[in-house]
């Protein structure tokens, strides 16, 4: 294993009814005024907003509400949130929602303390080492943002989808109550499954060194996702399956699965970010298209690990059989595997390729993912 530092200061509060305690948790850390951010009005209709606001009020924490954050969050909304946070002089930001809300909140938290435009932090024009404290009550399991230090946001003007990262962005406390994900629509459940698998396989397949322990952890996460997704599609009220699915999502991207690994990259995300930025496709749906297409191009570069994946995850022999099995499972659960299912045509490839080239430069893999390679992967997804 490679030398590594593993530092995750986030406190996870997992279980039924934990959201009712968020006020006490935040008050104990000195929070007195909070910007509560959310996405859809769903949390108003199902009573979650009332539950959280009452919990805050019981501790004397003043609440400023800020809603309307969309899936594939955008920088213009982040800027709005920063302005509201500054106007009301809040001392913390609370995300109540999924990864899009939490990523937006992290960007807001960094932007409030930064002197310039927050997009500077995404492009590298500006730097930050502090942020407002971030808290979360999760309503969707997918991104792992509840226990990591990064955020991804799109710029709707430049059609870029970029990320920031800093230890300052680790949530202080994240509440994961599996029951709060019951109202997630079927399509977003399966998109989430693809997202979690994508987070798991990036280092698993691309690392120059991936310890056996880490490979086993990844395989456990993926097998759990496959198992619990099928259970939830059959019975959406299965909260035990929801709990395991949610925890798998957290483990997939909190650093534990690639601690001690070396030389890995995120090509699937680099490609999919362009699909989201250009065509506003759901992130997980884009990943379920990109992953098999990328695997068909890449597997000869790490045949032993791909053969292991095929055997350990699907009980089949050979890299190509494993890739086919994953693609078949995506079809089975109803997440897309072809660009045409996303409304993307071959005539769009030039724009996608140009956008991806910017992403792979940011990810440090531009020498591998040339225009020709990107084109080959996209053609695999036709």
Image (cartoon, helix red, strand yellow):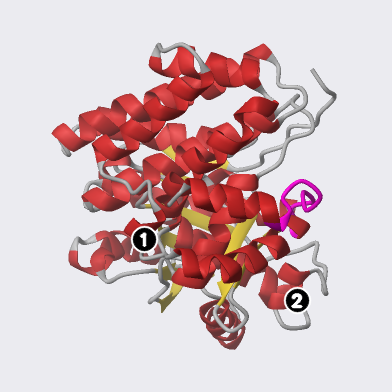
Q: In which quarter of the image is residue 340?
A: bottom left
Q: Is the magenta stretch mostly helix, strand or loop?
A: loop
Q: Residue at x 50, y 42 (%)?
A: 293
Residue that label 1 marks? 342
Return the x and y of residue 55 as percentages of the image width and height: 35, 59
Characterize the local packing of mark 1: few (<14), some (14-19) or many (20 or more) Cα atoms within 10 angstroms.
some
Closer to viewer: mark 2 or mark 1: 1
100 vs 248: above or below: below
Residue that label 2 marks? 120
Report the quarter where the N terminus lies: top right
Q: What element carries label 2?
A: helix
**Residue 165 horizontal side relative to residue 312, left or right:** right
235 vs 351: above or below: above
Return the x and y of residue 306 as percentages of the image width and height: 57, 21
**Residue 267 horizontal side relative to residue 242, left or right:** right
Q: Nearer the viewer, residue 136 or 234?
A: 234
Characterize the local packing of mark 2: few (<14), some (14-19) or many (20 or more) Cα atoms within 10 angstroms.
few
Magenta-colored span: 362-371
Return the x and y of residue 65 as percentages of the image width and height: 41, 77
Q: Is mark 1 on a helix, strand or loop?
A: helix
Q: Distance between the residues labelled 2 and 1?
A: 31 Å
């Amino acid at each position: 294993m490679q030398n590594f530092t593993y530092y995750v200061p986030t406190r996870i509060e997992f279980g039924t009814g934990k959201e009712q305690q968020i006020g006490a948790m935040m008050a104990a850390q000195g929070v007195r005024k909070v910007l509560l951010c959310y996405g859809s009005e769903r949390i108003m209709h199902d009573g979650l907003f009332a539950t959280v606001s009452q919990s805050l009020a019981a501790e004397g924490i003043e609440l400023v509400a800020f809603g309307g954050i969309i899936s594939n969050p955008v920088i213009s909304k982040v800027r709005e949130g920063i302005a509201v946070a500054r106007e009301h002089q809040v001392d913390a930001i609370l995300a109540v929602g999924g990864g899009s809300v939490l990523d937006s909140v992290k960007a807001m938290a960094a932007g409030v303390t930064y002197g310039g435009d927050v997009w500077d932090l995404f492009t590298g024009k500006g730097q930050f080492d502090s942020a407002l404290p971030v808290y979360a009550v999760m309503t969707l399991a997918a991104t792992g943002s509840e226990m990591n230090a990064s955020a991804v946001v799109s710029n709707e003007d430049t059609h870029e989808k970029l990320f920031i990262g800093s230890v300052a962005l680790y949530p202080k406390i994240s509440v994961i109550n599996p029951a709060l994900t019951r109202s997630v629509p079927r399509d977003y459940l399966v998109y989430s499954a693809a997202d979690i698998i994508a987070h798991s396989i990036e280092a698993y397949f691309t690392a120059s060194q991936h310890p056996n322990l880490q490979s086993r952890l990844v395989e456990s996460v993926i097998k759990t996702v496959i198992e619990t997704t099928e259970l939830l599609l059959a019975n959406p009220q299965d909260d035990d399956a929801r709990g395991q699915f949610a925890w798998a999502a957290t483990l997939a991207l909190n650093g534990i699965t690639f601690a001690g690994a070396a030389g890995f990259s995120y090509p699937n995300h680099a490609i999919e970010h362009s699909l989201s930025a250009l065509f506003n496709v759901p992130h997980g749906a884009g990943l379920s298209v990109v992953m098999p297409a990328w695997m068909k191009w890449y597997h000869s570069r790490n045949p032993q690990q791909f053969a292991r994946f095929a055997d350990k995850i699907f009980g089949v022999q050979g890299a190509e059989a494993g890739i086919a099995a994953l693609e078949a499972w995506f079809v089975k659960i109803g997440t897309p595997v072809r660009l045409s299912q996303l409304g993307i045509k071959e005539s769009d490839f030039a724009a996608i390729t140009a956008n991806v080239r910017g992403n792979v430069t940011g990810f440090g893999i531009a020498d591998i993912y040339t225009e020709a390679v990107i084109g080959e992967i996209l053609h695999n997804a036709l």
